[in-house]
Structure formats: C-alpha cells, structure tokens
Image (cartoon, rainbow, N blue to C red):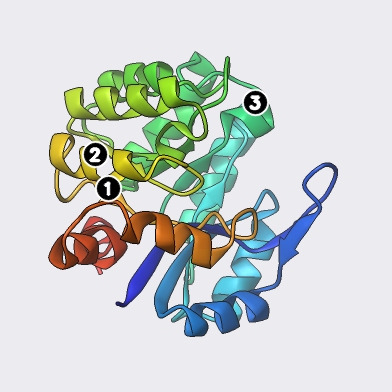
Amino acid sequence: MKKIDAHAHVGYFGSWCDVGVTAEEMVAAMRQYDIEKSIVSYPDNDVTLAALDGWPTQFCGLAWMDPNKGERAVADFAGLADRKAGVSGLKLHPLFNAYTANDPVVFPLIEEARKRGLPVFIHSGHPPFSLPWSIGQLAELYPDVRFVMIHMGHGHGVYIQAAIDVAAKHDNIWLENSGMPMHTKIREAYSRVGSDRIFWGSDAPFHHYAVEILRTEVSGLSESQLEDVFYNNVKKFMGW
C-alpha cells in the first residue's frame, strides 16, 4: 500500500535523543516501505532546504520556526515560503522551543500562515507546553487556519483522548498519529473526527517505520480506510 509520511525529520538530534537520518538514508527507507513522499522538518531550516533541493520529488518541507524570536521568526518564515523550492507549511514545537501553544507570542506566525494559506503542523502531548486543549484554543482563535495536531496527544492516554475530543469539536484540526501507542484510537479518530482528517506519520528517526506502519495496519480499519490514512487524506490536504 503506497504511503505519504505526514511527519518526519531529516538531520541529527543530539543530547538524550541521539538519533538522526540523512536525506539519502530516508529516501532509501522510503523506497523500502513504499512511501511516495515525506513531509520533513528540522530545527535548522537549512537542513530541510538541502533535502528539498536534493530530493524535490521525495520531500515536502515545513518551516520550523521559534515564535520566541518575534518579528525575525515571521520574516524568516516569509522568506522560506517565498523561496522557489520553498516550504509548504509551518512547523511549531512548543515543547522543544518552550512556549505554550496558545500563547500570544505564537499569533504573528499564525497570522503569516493564514495570509499565505499554509497549514500549521504543531507538536502535541506534553504539559504544560503542547496540550491538546491549548491547541484547540488556538484553532478556535483562527478558524480559517488548518492545524495538524502532530502525534494526536502522543504517549499519554488522557492527552490522546483529548486530541480526539478537541479535533471532533474543531473542523480546522487534523490529527497525525506518529508515536501514539494506542492502535484503537486511530480507528476512533477516523470515525469520530472524520474519515479525511487523520494522517499516518513515522516521526523518523525517532520511531521505526515498521512499527509505525504496523500500528495503523492493526487499528481495525478496512483496506480502503487504511488507504485514506496512509495516503489519500494527506494528499488531499496538501493539494497534491
């Protein structure tokens, strides 16, 4: 079954993570697991741009921006979006960059994404920075911006349920399922949030493709429903 990876990273993450993957290594893994395209990001956007330049068919890039940098972040995001082989969305990581998802410091970047019609991919699941409820408040403030709640609550059952509940209340929130351990919640999200509003992702190199694929495959969805999660939904969302 062909796939589009809605959330992955090129580059190396040090400290406690000590994981990394080059663009070349990721392309080889994509061939192995029938992944047509990967949406990638990295804290240093030059790494993402290099992947886009080297593998324009295989990669779609997100601009990883730190809203704590204020006007500079907005200007940098605009420049990345204007680039000929530019990025196709905004990546926010409240945990990594230490801000809450609904903090006013985020608003200027969201305004820029709204002006450009670009989606916002935002990490979820870790208190106090990236709780689903805070992302829901952000989505409520910007009903005409499309938000992707990465990890759909991540590793805690309470936050996973909250991600589904919040997305069900806001039609401008989509869910991405990488690193989320509860296979049954994929089927619940498909049913409750919407058949076109949940994406498969790997979160490579933090998680293994085989594990992330299998979790979705055993979620209880039919073959046609799996095709939606693995491929159709994100393709439609990104306008490909």
Helix, strand or loop at label 1? It is strand
* Residue 93 percent across, percent down from the top left: 57, 35
Residue underneath mark 3: 68
**Front residue (pair 69, 197):** 197
Whether label 2 touches label 3, CB < 8 Å: no
Report whether residue 88 is seen.
no
The amino acid beneath tag 3 is Asn
Residue for badge 2: 189
Q: Quadrant of the C terminus?
A: bottom left
Q: Residue at x 60, y 66 (%)?
A: 49
Question: Residue 51: x and y, percent?
Answer: 61, 73
Gap in Å between the C-alphas at discs 2 and 1? 7 Å
Residue 210 appears in view = yes
Q: Please state the horizontal and vertical placement of residue 53, each as a whole percent of the image.
A: 58, 78
| Mark seen at residue 198 | 1
Residue 48, image quadrant: bottom right
